[in-house]
Image: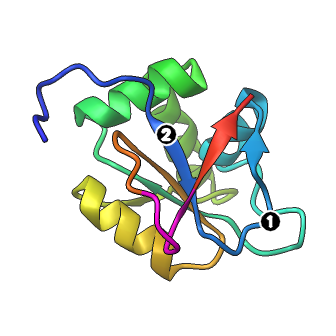
Amino acid sequence: MLYGADFSVPAVLIHPHVALDSLSRDELRAIFAMRRRTWPDGTPIQVFVLPDDHPLHRAFCKQVLNVYPHQLRRIWDRGVFSGTGQAPIEVSSVEEMQKRIAAVPGAIGYTDRIQQDASVKAITVR
């Protein structure tokens, strides 16, 4: 994978036990802004992201969430510093993200390639 390459629209991945096949952009924005904290069944949502300067993170923010990475970072920092929220868990690579999503019930993240197997589930953005 070339990190300097242009990415097509990133795919959203969730843990396979999350009983959803799609989410709206508004729902995704609420999840990645750490405002929505549980799935409909009550399972806690665990958000995984790549570093702010990673090309895939920038593409995900702009193309899927319709925000800039610095705007998302500001939301996370505000929640952490005010004591009302938390930041997502940052991982260093797409491979690590997929492994963490597979290992953590309720996890959500994104990828630039769909190598879906039983360990993760790609969902539709509506």
Q: Which mark is residue 11?
A: 2
* Numbered range of the magenta stretch: 116-121
Q: How is the image coloured?
A: rainbow
Image location of residue 69, percent across then percent down: 41, 28
Q: Quadrant of residue 91?
A: bottom left
Q: In the rendered image of this protein, does residue 99 appear above or below residue 61?
A: below
Direction from residue 99 to residue 55 in the image, left or right: left
Mark 2: few/some/many CA within 10 Å (<14, 14-19, 20+): some
The reply to whether the magenta stretch includes residue 119 is yes
Mark 1: few/some/many CA within 10 Å (<14, 14-19, 20+): few
> Marks 2 and 1, Cα distance to the nearest angstrom?
17 Å
Tell me which residue sits at (35%, 36%) in the image.
57
Q: Is residue 70 visible?
A: no
- Which residue type does callout 1 highlight? Ala
Along the line of sight, which residue is nearer the eye, 90 or 98? 98
Q: Quadrant of the C terminus?
A: top right
- Which residue type does callout 2 highlight? Ala
| Secondary structure state at the residue bearing disc 2 | strand
Count the labels in the image. Answer: 2
